[in-house]
Image (cartoon, grey):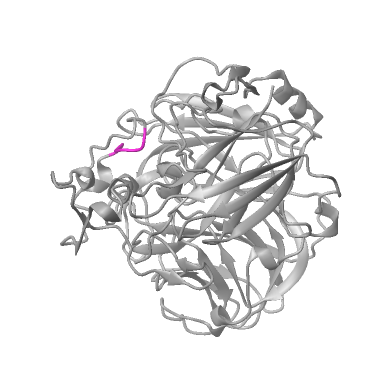
Amino acid sequence: MNSINRRSVLLAGLGAAGAGALAACSHASGSGSGTTLIGPNASAVAATEKKRKSTGHQRKVTLTAAPAMIDLGGGVMPKTWAFDGRTPGREVRLAVGDTLVAELSNQLPNKTTTSIHWHGIALRNDMDGVPPATQTAVRAGSTFTYRFLADAPGTYFFHPHVGVQLDRGLYAPLIVEDPKETLAYDDEWVVLLDDWIDGVTGTPDEVFAELRHGMGGMDMRESAGSGSSGMDDMGDMGGMDMGGDSASPAASASSSGDMSMKFMLMGAESDLLGGDAGDVKYPHHLINGRVAADPDVYTGKPGKKVRLRIINAGGDTAYRVALGGHKLTITHTDGFPVRHQEVDALLVGMGERYDVLVTLGDGVFPLVALAEGKNANGLALVRTGSGSKPPATVRPKELDGMIMTASQLRADDDVLLKSAKTDATHQIKLTGGMDKYNWAINGRPFDMKDPEANPIVIEEGQRVRLDFVNDTDMWHPMHLHGHTYQLGDLGPRKDTAIVLPKKKLSVFFDADNPGQWMLHCHNAYHGEAGMMANVAYRG
């Protein structure tokens, strides 16, 4: 097996649930430069929010994070954590310029803290949901109200930003509609992809406890049995608010340091991803919360044009997506329009979103999300007429046809960044490997106890260039909070982009949203291990 860099997104293995407001401006003690950074409660943050165009309308929702037994279909009913007892959570939809008012009620067990990150939204910094950098973690039994104006239309989603909670059932789509929408279509279908382990073979905390020992500490034998051993309801384990210590049996290695491999995936290879495809053995891959054996069904009429909003909410899996018997026309990625491109299939990394148009044929057709390199898939059905249900393992020929990735797309002219000189360039070296599971940025794992250490400092008004240099043997979907960047000079506008192993990707963005923003791998386990950094505005 290659020595690999793994999974990215999430982060924040919150160490402390401190009380009190975060400072408006703060001292970057770890930077060694005495730089004063703009904090989430700074006047510059409020001033930027006031510049956003508002409709004056509010969309109010309540989101209760609590343990739940959910029905994934096919008799699969795991215990997990979910919003309001369902996975995915209820879709939140509002119009451009509306203010979202979302009250989070934390009813998680064992004093587990949580938060909500509004993935892809360029919102005010104090509402970004990243403890302890932008807010105090929401304690069990308490509430926190997120309030922000959404001024960019698009397909987004939301999830926690504490430990590896992303890999449970706490996620839901967030759709910001454009009243000036120029696309013509008859219907919409939101398609959420997810890799599922929680409550089936173990918990995400047990997965991380095993992974963080690295290949060097592994007994290469598979552990006996694949049951959850009752671990699905043990609540808060390592990586939550326990300072990184884990009570999980998976962390109880022998004194020699050897551990059996219950969760680690071996031999996942993908040419599209440049080699190693992923770390984790998932028993199920879901589309809209349903297993492939008992799929979600979209019912429509032949000849109708449907907009699919595809969201990868997974923790460790890229999906190759195709609709049997159909071409897909890509219109947007990560909320921003691109020059339309007709394809057979597309590759969606964790945290990425794609909007596509499809004109429906007559019959029953499989929408397949192939777990790239993992020999497994999620399945949903499109039914417009008579026909039999395809098998759960169906592989339509489109999966091997013309496959599109973001690097091949062009931004729509209306959203191309205006030509400007680059004011600041930062090298973002992706480092680490599977042997020691020491994923990091520029060789330094992110320290949740000191989020202002080693910041990537920028200034308001700058055109910023980030050079992602992947020194690892694994691909990483790199997500920047609070902004969208452009891939190269003409590429799409995105907030999450795949950086292939041993490759470089240059992106550009305008520093127009003051505060402190996480930049991290959206592999939940890579990010939690330390592949994360603070992109901070100078005060």
Q: Is residue 234 above or below residue 395?
A: above
Residue 165: image quadrant is top left
Q: Position of residue 154 (x, y in %)?
A: 70, 51
Q: Position of residue 342 (x, y in %)?
A: 71, 75
By secondary structure, the bulk of the magenta-drawn segment is best described as loop
Q: Position of residue 346 (x, y in %)?
A: 60, 70
Q: Would residue 390 appear left or right of 512 to someone viewing this image?
A: left
Q: Would residue 137 appear left or right of 217 to someone viewing this image?
A: right
Label tally: 0
Q: Would residue 191 appear left or right of 154 to someone viewing this image?
A: left
Quadrant position of the N terminus in the picture: bottom left
- The one nearer the camera, 439 or 514, is 439
Residue 106 appears in the picture as rendered:
yes
Q: Is residue 321 above or below residue 421?
A: below
Quadrant position of the C terminus in the picture: top right
Q: Residue furthest front?
A: 32
Q: Residue at x 58, y 76 (%)?
A: 323
Q: Would residue 316 appear left or right of 62 to someone viewing this image?
A: left
Q: Position of residue 385 (x, y in %)?
A: 59, 81
- Give the extent of the magenta segment: 235-240
Q: Residue at x 46, y 16 (%)?
A: 19
Residue 172 appears in the picture as rendered:
no
Q: Is residue 405 above or below residue 126?
A: below
Q: Residue at x 49, y 47 (%)?
A: 9
Q: Residue at x 67, y 54 (%)?
A: 506
Q: Residue furthest top?
A: 20
Magenta highlight on residue 191: no
